[in-house]
Image (tube, grey):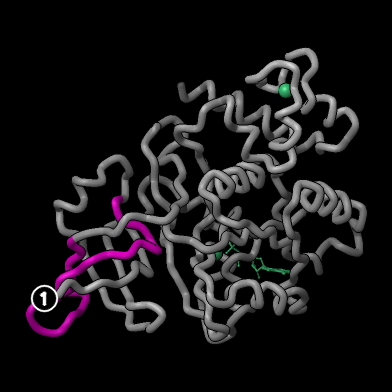
Amino acid sequence: MKKEAVVIRNAGSHFYLSRLPEWNPFPAVLRGRVRLKRSESTNPVAVGDKVQYETPDGDISEENPAVITGVTDRSNYIIRRSTNLSRQSHVIAANLDQALICVSLFFPEIKLPFLDRLLVTCEVYKIPAVIVLNKVDLYRNEAPDAVRYFTDIYAGAGYRVIQTSTLTGEGIDEVRELCKGKLNLLCGESGVGKSSLIKALDPGLSPKTGDISEAHLQGKHTTSLYEMYRMDCGGFVIDSPGLRGFGLVDLEKEEIYKYFPEMLATGDKCRFIPCTHTHEPGCAVKEAVEKREISPERYNSYLGMLEEDKKFR
Ligand SMILES: Nc1nc2c(ncn2[C@@H]2O[C@H](COP(=O)(O)OP(=O)(O)O)[C@@H](O)[C@H]2O)c(=O)[nH]1
Ligand SMILES: [Mg+2]
Ligand SMILES: [Zn+2]
């Protein structure tokens, strides 16, 4: 009988598997054939993948790991480009129920185009996304307008925004409630508090936090660690390193606007179809931006993606 499990940890070519929803982590390696079959990405197997495996003779250990022999088709997955200039992709996680996109307005200062790219990626792969606005203890009193402005943009685009502080515990119950019974990916820039959030959601867990050199360590020679945690509340969460180069591979230029939910409806009303929503007369999207029904920031991110798209073709 084939044995099946889920990948719960991936660092380079090292894996941990577990049966879910049980939790019995054990080490595993990849059989070469699996590697070749899925060579379009730099990692053929990612956290969240359902895999088939064989057990070795004797007890499973780091020195005597299980062997992954196959991967079940994914219901969805999120990828990034391996490097800024390559078309090769790296699978971050697979089979997700929800993405929690962690941001902070300051410390580090938010980069809206980066957030929008994450959101578009989730839309492309039909993964429901929630924005976790963390560290509000640091700036909400000092910059209430910035908080309101941000929330208006993203609530206006149709996203749920939850204000949290892992320091005061604000908003943590709400996030935990959303995580129950789901496989959640926690993503966002380095330093916004992703690992701290996991600790706050379940104090029994201890992902590494506060490593300020994390971004710097993400160079070519270090291996990024993706790790799933089982939370007390009955949900699972994948911690990811600060992600850059979140790429959209194979997205037609004419399609990009469809992954901005607030542009999707408006984009049908343009005079010319297809419309790139840049220079065409009678463009309903541009009119909506002028009327501020669509936020100029989101539109700006859209334009940035169009530009970037050109570079990769
Ligand atoms: N003031 C404040 N600091 C936080 C909060 N959440 C995380 N931090 C701090 O931000 C730094 C980065 O946190 P970490 O969880 O490692 O971020 P990650 O890189 O996204 O995983 C650490 O020094 C945390 O103590 C928060 O809600 N409020
Ligand atoms: Mg972290
Ligand atoms: Zn248009």
Q: Residue sitting at 86 percent across and 37 percent down?
A: 293
Secondary structure under tag 1 reads loop
Viewer-closest of 266 and 32: 266
The image shows residue 114, relative to residue 160, as above or below, that is above
Q: Mark 1 near ligand 2 (CB under 8 Å)? A: no
Q: Residue sitting at 73 percent across and 37 percent down?
A: 265
**Does residue 182 belong to the magenta stretch?**
no
Which three-letter amino acid code belongs to the residue tagged 1?
Answer: Pro
Residue 294 at x, y = what percent?
81, 37
Viewer-closest of 15 and 248: 248
Residue 133 at x, y = what percent?
73, 61
Residue sitting at the far left:
57
The image shows residue 25, relative to residue 194, as above or below, that is below
Mainly helix, strand or loop, the magenta region?
loop
Q: Would you name the residue on which mark 1 appears?
A: 56
**Does residue 61 belong to the magenta stretch?**
yes
- Residue range in magenta is 44-69
Q: Residue sitting at 61 percent across and 61 percent down?
A: 100
Indicate the quadrant where residue 181 lies: bottom right
Residue 287 at x, y = what percent?
84, 25
156 displayed left or right of 172: right
| Ligand 1 found in image quarter | bottom right
